[in-house]
Image (cartoon, grey):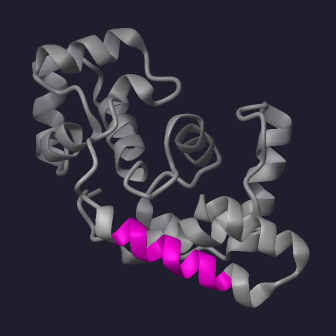
Amino acid sequence: HLWAISRYYDYTGNDTMRRYANQIRSQNIEKKRGKRPSLLLSEIEGIKREHIDGLANAGITNVKQLLEAGHTHNSRLALSEGTGIPYDVIVALVKLADLCRISDIKGMRVRLLFETGFDTIEKIAVQDPSAMRDQIISINQREKIAAHHPTLIETKFWVEQAKKLPKLVEY
């Protein structure tokens, strides 16, 4: 609800209240971080069923498990060998899982970021939110990945979140 309230205050031009709503929202997110259930791999847009099934056979069904199993080059190689999933696909899946650590990046949004080249937390953390949004819109208009473009508030939030997240994956 705080996201919607923030959007309302942005629309009405009340920057003080917008910032306050975002501040409360960020605090709530930090309190809940790590306490909510991990996103299932099947909920990420565009992952092939055969890859979901291959990972499930290895005991990996959610984002947290995939990040634990594929956080280093060697662990991704072992995962590829153990599941029969090509290494480059494993790398892409780990990147998608890593992006899901940013609040509000799930399903279609994670695919949108990935397809526009913002495929790691580190890349997002150094972006100018406005330029990032412009690039996402440009590619989304051409590729029709998502029905709606992210707002500037959303891209700012994503960049802020990315800056706060610890590095879990070695590339």
Which residue is located at x 65 percent, y 65 percent? 155
**In the image, residue 113 lies at what x, y percent?**
59, 48
The residue lying toward the viewer, choosing from 117 and 140, is: 140
Main SS type for the magenta part?
A: helix
Tell whether 150 sits left or right of 87: right
Q: Quadrant of residue 115?
A: top right
Which residue is located at x 22 percent, y 38 percent? 66
Which residue is located at x 35 percent, y 50 percent? 98
Tell whether 109 sits left or right of 38: right
The residue lying toward the viewer, choosing from 97 and 11, is: 11
Which residue is located at x 23 percent, y 55 percent? 35
* The magenta segment: 19-30
Measured along the vertical axis of the image, is residue 52 above or below residue 98? above
Measured along the vertical axis of the image, is residue 71 above or below residue 147? below
Measured along the vertical axis of the image, is residue 45 above or below residue 162? above
Tell whether 101 sits left or right of 110: left
Q: Quadrant of residue 22?
A: bottom right
Considering the image in quadrants, where does the N terminus appear? Answer: bottom right
What number of labels is visible? Answer: 0
Tell whether 148 sits left or right of 169: right
The residue lying toward the viewer, choosing from 93 and 63, is: 63
Q: Quadrant of residue 148?
A: top right
**In the image, residue 10 lies at what x, y percent?**
81, 74
Residue placed farthest to the bottom in the image?
A: 16
Considering the image in quadrants, where does the C terminus appear? Answer: bottom left
Measured along the vertical axis of the image, is residue 20 above or below residue 34? below
**In the image, residue 96 lies at what x, y percent?**
42, 42
Residue 156 lies within the magenta run: no
